[in-house]
Amino acid sequence: MNNQELKRIIDQICRDKGLDRSVLIITLEEAIRSAAKRKYGLSDNFEVTFNEETGEIDVFHFKEVVEEVTSPGTQISLEEAKKLDPESALGEELGVKLDASNFGRIAAQSAKQVIIQRMKDAERDLIFDEYKDRVGEIVNGIIQRVDKGNIILNLGRSEALLPSSEQIPRETYYHRGERLRALIIDAKLVSRGPQIILSRTHPDFLAALFEAEVPEISEGIVKIVSVAREPGSRAKIAVTTSDNEIDPVGACVGLRGSRVQSVVQELKGEKIDIIPYSADIAHYVASALAPAGVIRVVVDEDVRSLEVIVPDEQLSLAIGRKGQNVRLASRLVGWRIDVKNESKYQRALKDGYQSLLRLPGVGEVTADLLFEAGYGSAKDIIEVEPEQLSMIDGLPQGKAKQIWDAAKDYVDNLAREDAEEAAREAMAKDFFSQKAEREAPAAPEALEPGAAAIGETPADGPDEAL
C-alpha cells in the first residue's frame, strides 16, 4: 500500500463512519507503535508520526548512546550513532528510523486489530455523544426484531430498544420491516456499546407529537405547560400563549381538527383533551375537569388541595369512568382534587354555619365574618391558633380567644356525645345478644347406653305385664 492510498483510505473511513480525522490518525499511530513493539521488543521507546501531507508513516526507535552496548534493544554505540548523526554524544538518545514495511505478518495483524478495535470504540463514542443530546426527541425506526415483548428498532447507525413497559397497552405492534415512531428517553453506554431507550407512553411523547404537528409550538408562540396521560385511553394537555391574538387551543386543534387528529391517529385513537392554561388555579381546574361544569372551587394553598363543587347531575361526568377524568385533571394541575356534588356541599355548609351560630357570643354578624374568612364550622376554627383568628377584619379585639375556646368546648362536647352514643349502642347490642343466647333452646343431653328418653318405649326390651 503506497502513501497516497493510505491517505485515501483514511479520508474514506472518516467520511463513511463520521469519525474525527485526528482520532483515526492517533489510532493509526498507536497501531504502528504496537506493531513495532511486537517486532523489536516490549520497550516504550518508539515514536510514530503520520505525515498528513504525504501520507508517510515515520517510525523512530530511540536508543541511548553508550560507549559499550550491553542492551542492543535500548542502546547504541557512539561509533554507530556518529554514522547516523555526527553531533551525537554519550548519554543522549538517538532516534533510529525504522522501515514500517519490515514489521512482519504478525506485527501487521496486531496493528490491524488495534485499528479495528479503536475504530469501533470511536464509532461507539460518536453514536453515544449524538444520542445523549437527543433525549426528548422523536425518532423513526424500522422494526428489526421482537425479543420477549421488547422491540428492537434500527435507527440507521445504531439500534434502539422499546421495552414492553414503554409500549402503549393494547396497541398492536407491527411486523419486521415496518416503521415506528417513539421518543428517546435515555441513552447510556454499556459493555456492548451505546444503548438507546425509547418510549411511546411517556407524556413528553405526546408533547413532542404536538410540537411536530403545530408550527406555533415549534416556533415558541404556543407553549405546552403540562401533560397528563393514561396511554392508550385518554390524555389532557394544557397550552398557553403570550400572543393575545392567537388561540392556543385552536392552534393545536387545527382546521377541522386536522392537527389533533394526526396525533390521535399516531396514538391509535387515544382521546385528547386540549385545555387553556390559567394562572388562576380555580379557572385552571375548571377547564381541566371539562366537559363537566364547575359551580365553585375552594382552594387550600397550604396543602395544595382543591374542593370542586359540580351540579348533581354532572358528578359522574366530572369524576369520569373509574375516576379517570378527575385523576388526569389532578396530574395536569399538580393539586389534589376532591369533587363534590352541589347538594352535599350545601348540606355541609348549612351544618357548618349552624355550628358557628351555636357558639356562645357568636351572632350572625360574627358568623358571617368567620365564614367569609374560610372558617365554615367550629371544627375549622380549632384547626388554627387563636392569633390567626384575630387577623380577621371586623372581628372585635380580644374576641378571637373567646371564640376559639367556645369552639374547642363545642367540638369536645360533640366528640364526647358521639363516644357516649357509641358506647350505648355497643351495650344495647351486647344486651340483645346475650338475651338471644339465653332464649335459644338447649341441645338435648346425650343418653346413657341402653336408656330411653322420657315418654319413649325401649325398642328391644321385653313387654311389661299389665
Image (spheres, rainbow, N blue to C red):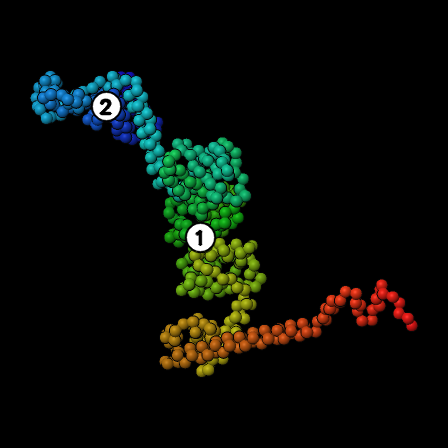
The N terminus lies in quadrant? top left
Tell me which residue sits at (89%, 69%) in the image: 464
Q: Position of residue 113 (x, y in %)?
A: 32, 25
Q: Is there any visible trace of residue 246 in the rendered image?
A: no
Q: Is mark 2 on a helix, strand or loop?
A: loop
Q: Where is residue 298 in the image (x, y as percent from the top left)?
A: 46, 65
Residue under label 2, please give it.
Answer: 41
Camera-side residue of 438 and 216: 438
Q: Residue 238 carries which label?
A: 1
As drawn, which residue projects farthest toward the bottom? 361
Camera-side residue of 290 and 177: 177
* Residue 353 drawn above or below residue 69: below
The C terminus lies in quadrant? bottom right
Tell me which residue sits at (13%, 21%) in the image: 69
Camera-side residue of 453 and 291: 453
Q: Is there any visible trace of residue 236 in the rendered image?
A: yes
Q: What element carries label 1?
A: strand
From the viewer's perspective, is 350 left or right of 216?
right
Q: What residue type is labelled 1?
A: Ala
Q: Do the residues labelled 1 and 2 touch (CB within 8 Å)?
A: no
Between disc 1 and disc 2, whose residue precedes? 2
Closer mark to the observer between disc 1 and disc 2: 2
Q: Position of residue 282 (x, y in %)?
A: 45, 61
Q: Residue 47 carries which label?
A: none
Q: What residue type is labelled 2?
A: Gly
Number of marks in the image? 2
Tell me which residue sits at (58%, 62%) in the image: 313
Tell me which residue sits at (48%, 60%) in the image: 337
* Residue 224 drawn above or below residue 339: above
From the viewer's perspective, is 303 left or right of 452?
left
Q: Where is residue 316 in the image (x, y as percent from the top left)?
A: 56, 59
